Image (spheres, rainbow, N blue to C red):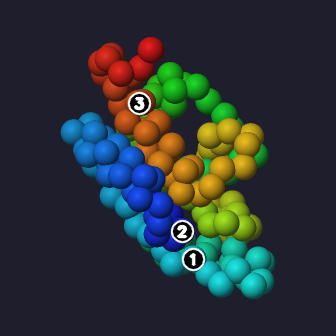
Amino acid sequence: MIAVGKVRERYVAEALADFRARLRPYHRFEEVEVRGADGSDAERAMRTEGEAILRHVEPGDHVWLLERTGEQMSSEELARRIERLPHDGIARLTVVVAGTYGASPELLARADLRWSLSRLTLLHEWARMLAVEQLYRAAKIARDEPYHH
């Protein structure tokens, strides 16, 4: 996962730590935080953050960008899609959480999937936490283990 900014709210950080720990037995999970840009110019901030994110994306990465206008899917659909990745020759999934002003055109173009958690606008810290929880939930669903009802 590549995300803009550090998690500042303690309760979000604690939830992220919990779901990271739960996810690790199922998938290798790494997080990279890139610095949030100065917000005085939204276009420049998106461009700067997008460039910083793209420096961490490898050519073979399959990129899912969290984007409010992207594709929504159920937890079961998410589980099936993630399980299908290796069969499609994809070795590494990179989930990206852009900053406050959204994703740059270059980042949008690089995304293999624009994934929407909701049509609602979410704080990007919350979106990050929810995405990690959904990755964990998808792993449990894929193994037919209890957690999802």
Kindly report the distance in space between the C-alpha atoms of the residues bearing marks 2 and 1.
Answer: 5 Å
- Left or right of residue 27: residue 13: right
Residue 59: x %, y % from top left: 47, 64
Using the image as rendered, state which of residue 37 and residue 95 is in the foreground: 37
Q: Secondary structure at mark 1?
A: loop
Q: Residue at x 51, y 78 (%)?
A: 35
- Left or right of residue 110: residue 121: right
Identity, as a three-letter code, of the amino acid under mark 2: Val
Residue 130: x %, y % from top left: 51, 43
Identity, as a three-letter code, of the amino acid under mark 1: Gly
Q: Is residue 89 visible?
A: yes
Q: Residue at x 52, y 26 (%)?
A: 75
Farthest front residue in view: 10
Identity, as a three-letter code, of the amino acid under mark 3: Arg
Of the residues under marks 2 and 1, which one precedes in the sequence? Answer: 2
The residue labelled by disc 1 is 36
The residue labelled by disc 3 is 137
Of the residues under marks 3 and 2, which one precedes in the sequence? Answer: 2
Q: Secondary structure at mark 3?
A: helix
Using the image as rendered, state which of residue 76 and residue 132 is in the foreground: 132
**Vertical order, 117 against 75 (above or below):** below
- Say if mark 2 contacts mark 1, CB within 8 Å: yes
Give residue 83's quadrant in the image: top left
**Vertical order, 107 against 94 (above or below):** below
Quadrant occupied by the C terminus? top left
Farthest left residue in view: 25
Q: Residue at x 62, y 30 (%)?
A: 73
The residue labelled by disc 2 is 4
